[in-house]
C-alpha cells in the first residue's frame, strides 16, 4: 500500500503565529511584572510609613508639639495637640464598643468655616478627615445698587 500526502499551498505558507493575535501591551509579562511590583511597593510603603513614623515618636510627643494628630493617639493626646472639639457625637456599636466623632470648627472669617472630623473607638483615634471651605456667599443683588453718574 502506497500512502500519499497532499500538501496544499495554503498550509505551507501560513505559520502558527499568523493565526494568533498579538498580545496587548498591558498583558505582556514584563509589563505586568513592573505594574505588580510598583503596586506592591506602593502598598508596602502605605503600610510601613505610618509604622515608621510611630516608631520614631512612640509617645506622640513630637506630633503633639507640632499640633498634629495621628491614628493611634488617645483622646488625651489629641486634646493636648488640638484642644477640645466644638461637638462630640457618641454612639455604640451592636457589640457595645463606644465610638465618638469629634468635630472641630475653624472659622477663617465670619463667612468661611472649615471642619475637621476625628473618629475614636474605645478612646483611641482610628481616623479622620478634613472638610474644605463652607463659605457662605453674599447675596447677589445688593439692597443699594450702584448707579453710575451721568457725564455733563
Image (cartoon, rainbow, N blue to C red):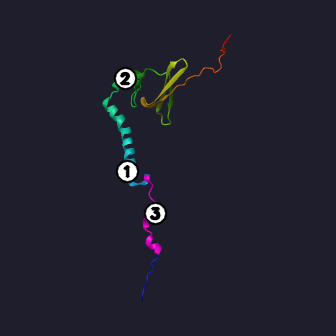
Which label's residue is closer to the chain start, 2 or 3? 3
> Which SS class for mark 2?
loop
> In this picture, is 121 found above or below 1?
above
User: Are the two marked residues, 2 and 1, in contact with CB atoms closer than 8 angstroms?
Assistant: no
> In this picture, is 103 found above or below 45?
above
Q: Residue at x 43, y 67 (%)?
A: 16
Considering every residue shown, the one lying at the far front of the view is 152
Residue receiving disc 1: 33
Considering every residue shown, the one lying at the far bottom of the view is 1
- The region drawn magenta spans 9-25
Residue receiving disc 2: 66
In-image side of 62 versus 15 (left or right): left
Q: Is residue 57 magenta?
A: no
Q: Residue at x 55, y 23 (%)?
A: 135
Nearest to viewer (mark 1 / mark 3): 3
The Cα–Cα distance between marks 1 and 3, rounded to whole angstroms, is: 23 Å
Position in image of residue 10 (x %, y %):
47, 73
Image quarter where the C terminus lies is: top right
User: Are the two marked residues, 2 and 3, in contact with CB atoms closer than 8 angstroms?
Assistant: no
Position in image of residue 96 (x %, y %):
48, 34
Q: Is residue 14 magenta?
A: yes
Position in image of residue 102 (x %, y %):
48, 26
Residue receiving disc 3: 20
> Which SS class for mark 1?
helix
Q: Residues within 10 Å of mark 2 (few under 14, many from 20)?
A: few
> Which SS class for mark 3?
loop
Amino acid at each position: 500500500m502506497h500512502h500519499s500526502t497532499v500538501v496544499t499551498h495554503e498550509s505551507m505558507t501560513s505559520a502558527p503565529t499568523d493565526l494568533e493575535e498579538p498580545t496587548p501591551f498591558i498583558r505582556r509579562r514584563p509589563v505586568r511584572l513592573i505594574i505588580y511590583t510598583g503596586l506592591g511597593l506602593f502598598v508596602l510603603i502605605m503600610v510601613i510609613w505610618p509604622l515608621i513614623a510611630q516608631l520614631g515618636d512612640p509617645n506622640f510627643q513630637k506630633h503633639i508639639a507640632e499640633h498634629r494628630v495621628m491614628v493611634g493617639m488617645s483622646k488625651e493626646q489629641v486634646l493636648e495637640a488640638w484642644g477640645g472639639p466644638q461637638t462630640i457625637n457618641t454612639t455604640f456599636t451592636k457589640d457595645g464598643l463606644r465610638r465618638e466623632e469629634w468635630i472641630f470648627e475653624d472659622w477663617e472669617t465670619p463667612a468661611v468655616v472649615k471642619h475637621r472630623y476625628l473618629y475614636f473607638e474605645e478612646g483611641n483615634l482610628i481616623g479622620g478627615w478634613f472638610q474644605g471651605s463652607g463659605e457662605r456667599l453674599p447675596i447677589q443683588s445688593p439692597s443699594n445698587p450702584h448707579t453710575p453718574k451721568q457725564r455733563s
